[in-house]
Image (spheres, rainbow, N blue to C red):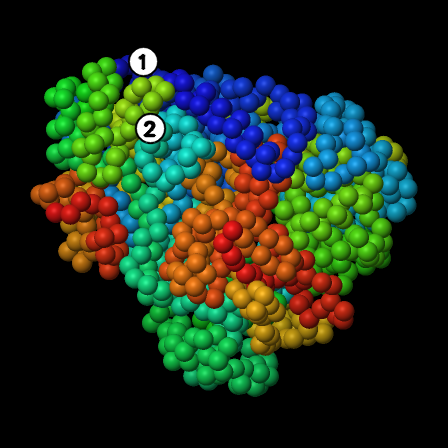
Amino acid sequence: MDGSEDRFKSSINEERRRFLKSMGLWGFTLGTASMVGDLAEDAFGSFCSPMYGKPDFDEVVNTACGICMVQCGMKAYKKNGRVCYVAGNPADPFSRGHLCAKGKASLGFLNNPDRLLYPIKRTNPDNKDFGVNPGWVRITWEEAFSTIVDKMMENTDNGKHGERLAIFSHGNYGWVARLLGALGSPNLITHYDTCFSPFYVARKALIGDNCWCNLEGVKYMLSFGWDQLDRSKNHPSAQTTTAIANGAKVVCFNPYQGTLGALGTQWIPIKPGSDLAVALAMIQRILSQNRFDKEFVKNKTNFYEHEKAIRDHFKTFTPEWAEKISEVPAKTIITIADEFSDPKHWPALIPNHKRDGAGGPNYVNSYQMAHAIILLNALVGAIDREGGKATMAFTWNPGGQVACAQNPKPLKELIQEKGAIDGKHEYPLVRDLITDRGIFYNVAQRILDKDPYELKMAIFRRYGIQSFPNPKKMAKALSTLNYLVFVDSMPKDIMWFADLVLPEVMFLESDWISDRLYTTPGYQMVFAANKAQAPVGEQKGWGGMVFELGKRVDQKLGTKYFQTKEGEWIKDDKDAFLKPLGITFAELKQLPESMWKKEVPYTSKSEYKTPSHKIEMYGTLFEKHGYDPLPKWIEKSAQPNEEYPYYLLIRRLPGMKHSAPLTSNNPYILDAFPKPFAEINSATARKLGIAEGDRVELKSKNGSVQIIARISERIRPDCIMYLHNYGHILPELSLSQGDTGDGNLIPDRPKPKEKDKDWSASAWMSDVCVRIQKI
Amino acid sequence: MDIQRRQALKTIGIGGIGAALLAGKGLANASQNYVQYGVLVDTRKCINCKACQVACKLWNGNQPDPTTFKNQFSASTFTYVSECKFTGPYPNVKYHTAKRQCMHCEDPACVQACPQGGAAIHKEPNGMVVINHENCLRCGSCTEACVFGGAVNLDEKAFLLKKCTFCIDRIRHGLVPACVETCLTGALQFGTLEEINNKGLEAKNQGYPVHGLKGEKWATSWIYIWPKGVENRTMFFPKV
């Protein structure tokens, strides 16, 4: 090498010193050596072997990218037993041999000097707080597993009070639910309400299942804050730019221009949280003009069964009414409604995805917006279209399951019996339709209030306190627990409060199955994501950890929840998952490119999993549970005032996965996306005396962050845009950007006094106003 | 292609990929036939994801640059995505982004400026402008002469001048440049310079601003198509 790795190592140390200093920590490093071991010595030197001259690899392994759920086909190139380069697999029809910045930078995650390498336990359990040394010491896996199971038994009184245990798990939901069920706990909790519960519940309730928006062939794309290009997900980005190149009209309602607004046809800087008014007015206009896909609506939806109610409901939502709320001229709304509903512009589609824009869990009215988007898409026949193009299409996976000797009580029944610490029992549609997901918005307060009971122990997999709105409150809640376990590949700031930490492999270090849930119609496919190299430490996979804990719980309780009918302990479920395809995992690995794929023409369903077996424009399931069967106008909650005069917008950068350290502490990602910043309109900046690059404080009623300012023209003057992707308060994360998480600005939503009208239990993540000042 | 390397490529499957990528273009042995290569940078499709930046660092073994964090060329940053250009004030504004790297000019100013008379930096018959470290005096004449904003930079530790190599190593072994390989949207396209120039001409005829075409003062191997309406001041091509 040319010596530049030495420069980098010294830079890491310099950054770490600066970070520790800035965080006011006083000279200890939380036993870093016990976790990091000797990896840091060569972490960024050896894998970048000098390749100038010729491609110089020993072996290529077919695998898949595990950074996000798109799971693009990947080839891992190895030299001397280590992965030294990754590239997309051209045989994957969706990723087509390309990888985004996150996937490409996965070597910065694999070889990250801060990775967790061994199980560790706290030796200072009585004093948990930010800045208090936990006194980590390395332990064996045997000690780790036996300690965790002992603590599970102790804190649940041997399963008599399973509800005192919660697992906050990102992934592996079925087996985690089984482990909890074995102990009688209803508390499987995930981040769905902070990410996409409104449209997820809406899709489940109104069209029967979740789906994926296929943009291929779209001629008219209408976005309410959706910006897939800004997320840079692989094939959706390519589909979008291809549609634009093919002449598709792209209309973007968004207070921030973003990439879609820039590359699209028309950017309309709408007032934050008023998208619902425009959507309702569009429905009104389309119905009043009687110009919609009548055949689709008749054959596929329950529109004509409820026609009068629907038409009457929307009568008052005129474009003129919507103009007063949204500041979008009525004339513009009419034009867009007419274009969208004009068959010459079809296929037309309103895509939405996760936390994007108005249909995500951003505003008080987002759940109604999610319903309105389904209505608009139904009116132009953009749901489950034959052929699958330009449609909200259903996804596929083999879904085979292991048959176990004994099954615990289902999660749903446990929730009904005991209630859930995340409040899921108060949301029947969340409980029934997304039972194995969860609610983050108020769980900290519920833990503090012991509502509906006391939580004594928790296991967090991949979540940190920054995953929650009002993370400081979550930290306070976690400090009240008797025992806290953290599982991840990288450290997170939850470790200030954890008692035991289990290190997890990253995706290149294990065999797994890529089930391609985010793929488009036309293919059924799975990959064997082959293990590309041995773990850099003693890490294990989360699935294996759950099986081991399940086995030990069975042994303690005398149950058989983690045994096959033949009496064998379950160690793997890959063969069972693939069984419907008639192949084993070993056989899948041997297929060309380790890929099973079958071209299957997408056929539209004849029946949907809804009460009417149709797509429900009129939501009978909502009505049955006492909710609005049709979307109506609700005002956004936070409005600018003297103290907090600006709307907060939150953007997610294309190179980042949330604020997870796999990207936010990844040197390649930080090279490309270096610093958190607040973006301000130039007129606002002038008024406030803020210049490009100035340090500013962004403050909401919940908290503040100190970052730099960027001035631009692509944002409304009454808005401040901040990034979702940075911020960790942990010295082990040597490249972290300090206490800059956007969660600091987001209040945890209070528990409603009466029955919550928001059937999705959304966390309202952007319904916040802020002030900004130069510091 | 010598037998040993061919065998090695076959073993690891790269030969197959390369053949697939370059099949039908008659480029597999192009280094001997002096076919000129080019890359189309279609900024209409650039989504500012910066995957090309990361790919370049990884392929070239260039270290991330955690101390500077600047969006600019350096000895370890051969390429970056230039962002935040706009065409007007709010709300009549359009941002666009464009990848920047050595443009591998048709008549490179850096080569002209080299006191070693082309022994230290020269244009390959295939079009790549490359540095020969053995003959380089490290005088920095090439850095100063670059009309595209300093694409050649001194690695002070290694005491070597470094720049985008056009992935000459990959191209000669049947692979497209690392940045092109990973580009999600087709904003970067590799081909013969003739093919790329023709695509540029086609866009120009449709009214899109295009830079780097053959016959222009600043003809380059990397040809840029810009969105309509983008003002000249936001582009980084020198004024003609």
Which kind of residue does numbered mark 2 sit on? Ala
Comparing A262 with A309, the one in front is A262
Q: Are marks 1 and 2 in contact (CB under 8 Å)?
A: no
Disc 2 chain ID: B
Q: Is residue A741 visible?
A: yes
Quadrant where the N terminus of chain A sits is: top left
Q: Is residue B163 above or below residue A178?
A: above
Identified at 72% across, 57% down, the residue is A442
Can the viewer see residue B171?
A: no
Which element carries disc 1, helix, strand or loop? Answer: helix
**Residue B95 located left or right of residue A465:** left
- Disc 1: host chain: B
Count the marks: how many? Answer: 2
Give coordinates of residue A244: x percent, y percent: 33, 58
The structure residue drawn at horizontal position 57% and vertical position 44%, both measured from the top left corner, is A727
**Mark 1 → mark 2, Cα distance in angstroms:** 33 Å
Q: Quadrant of residue A333?
A: bottom left
The 10 Å Cα crowd at callout 1, few under 14, some 14 to 19, many 20 or more, is few
Residue receiving disc 2:
B75
| Residue B4 numbered tag | 1
Residue A22: where, in percent of width, then height?
Answer: 58, 38
Mark 1 vs mark 2: tell me if same chain. Answer: yes
Please tell me in which quadrant of the rendered image residue B228 appears.
bottom left
Q: Nearer the viewer, residue A161 or A358?
A: A358
Above or below, comparing residue A438 to residue A340 in the picture: above
Which is more foreground, mark 1 or mark 2?
A: 2
Label disc, if present, on residue A205 of the rendered structure: none
Residue B34: percent from left, percent from top: 14, 28
